[in-house]
Image: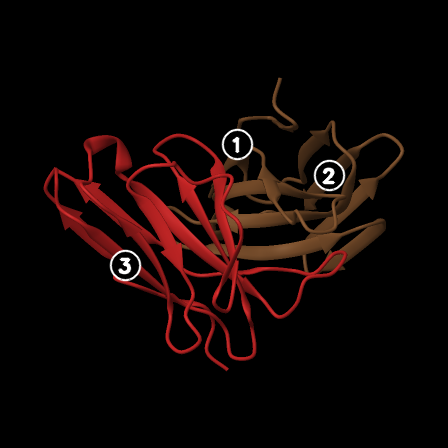
Chain colours: A brown, B red
């Protein structure tokens, strides 16, 4: 079983829909990242969370440390939001600052 | 302030050749991470370096792969005698210091194709 699981793997939605992408992890963490990767492009860091909730524009990220779960929400989705969204966690080890990545959720927003 | 720079963006090599991937971290960042993304797979950690030091290379294959981050100049990921299975996107990230929750800034990646 992967230490970081994302769901769904693929998601297609109509423009304007509210989108939720989920991430569950099984290890202790010091922080969780949500990343966005456009086809053929680089990776953009959207959020870094260690507790609670963060909002940036139409994007909202939440984390529940007790349940080891995080969600990324997109309100009023737009075709330009089409990308792969990756959840990544940093484990709670001082010297070992590895990040473990989920396999990503491929989002396609139809106009 | 320029972001993390990687070059080349695309690299084609024949089997048995060497591949050199370069990463210039953001200004003021002294920590560099290399990740590999194989086709249709997620990102995997390879190596974590500080200036002139390899801190953690547990994700890097034991043979043919090496990394350095010299006092001056970019970090280099070197793959000797490349094989087709090395074809992947290689991403570099940098951070200013290591601490709880310190964010990493990713470069655009180098896409390596081994013929």
Instruction: Tell me if mark 2 has few (under 14), some (14-19) or many (20+) residues whose alpha carbon lies within 10 angstroms of its own.
Output: many
The circle drawn on residue B55 is none
Q: Nearer the viewer, residue B18 or B27?
A: B18
* Residue B106: image location, x then y, percent: 49, 59
- Labels 2 & 1 near each other (Cβ < 8 A): no
Q: Residue at x 85, y 30 (%)?
A: A67
Instruction: Tell me if mark 1 has few (under 14), some (14-19) or many (20+) residues whose alpha carbon lies within 10 angstroms of its own.
Output: many
The extreme top residue here reads A1
Kindly tell me whether residue B69 is visible in this rendering: yes
Q: CA distance from mark 2 to mark 3?
A: 32 Å
Q: Are marks 2 and 1 on the same chain?
A: yes
Q: Is residue A68 left or right of residue B105?
A: right
**Which residue is the site of mark 3?**
B9
* Residue B45: image location, x then y, percent: 51, 42
Q: Residue at x 50, y 69 (%)?
A: B51
Give the number of the mark in front: 2 or 3. 3
Q: Considering only vertical position in the picture, is B33 above or below B28?
A: above
Give the number of the mark in front: 2 or 1. 1
Q: Is residue A46 left or right of residue B100?
A: left
Kindly tell me whether residue A76 is visible in this rendering: no
Q: Residue at x 33, y 44 (%)?
A: B65
Name the subunit of mark 3: B
Name the subunit of mark 2: A
Q: Secondary structure at mark 2?
A: strand
**Which residue is the site of mark 1?**
A103
Q: Residue at x 62, y 56 (%)?
A: A46
Name the subunit of mark 1: A
**Which residue is the site of mark 2?**
A71
């Amino acid at each position: 079983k992967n230490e970081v699981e994302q769901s769904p793997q693929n998601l297609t939605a109509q423009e304007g829909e509210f989108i939720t992408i989920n991430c569950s992890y099984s290890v202790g963490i010091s922080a969780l990242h949500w990343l966005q990767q456009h086809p053929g492009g680089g990776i953009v860091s959207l959020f870094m969370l260690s507790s609670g909730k963060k909002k940036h524009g139409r994007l909202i990220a939440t984390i529940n440390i007790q349940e080891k779960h995080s969600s990324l929400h997109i309100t009023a989705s737009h075709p330009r939001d089409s990308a792969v969204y990756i959840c990544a966690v940093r484990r709670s080890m001082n010297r070992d600052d590895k990040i473990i990545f989920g396999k990503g959720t491929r989002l396609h927003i139809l106009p | 302030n320029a972001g993390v720079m990687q070059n080349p963006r695309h690299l084609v090599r024949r089997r048995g050749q060497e591949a050199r991937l370069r990463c210039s971290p953001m200004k003021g960042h002294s920590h560099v991470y290399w990740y590999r993304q194989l086709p249709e797979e997620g990102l995997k950690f390879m190596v974590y370096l500080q200036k002139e030091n390899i801190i953690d290379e547990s994700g890097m294959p034991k043979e043919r792969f090496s990394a350095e981050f010299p006092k001056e100049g970019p970090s280099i990921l070197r793959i000797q005698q490349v094989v087709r299975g090395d074809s992947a996107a290689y991403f570099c990230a940098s951070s200013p210091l290591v601490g709880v929750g310190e964010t990493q800034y990713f470069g655009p990646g180098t896409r390596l194709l081994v013929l």
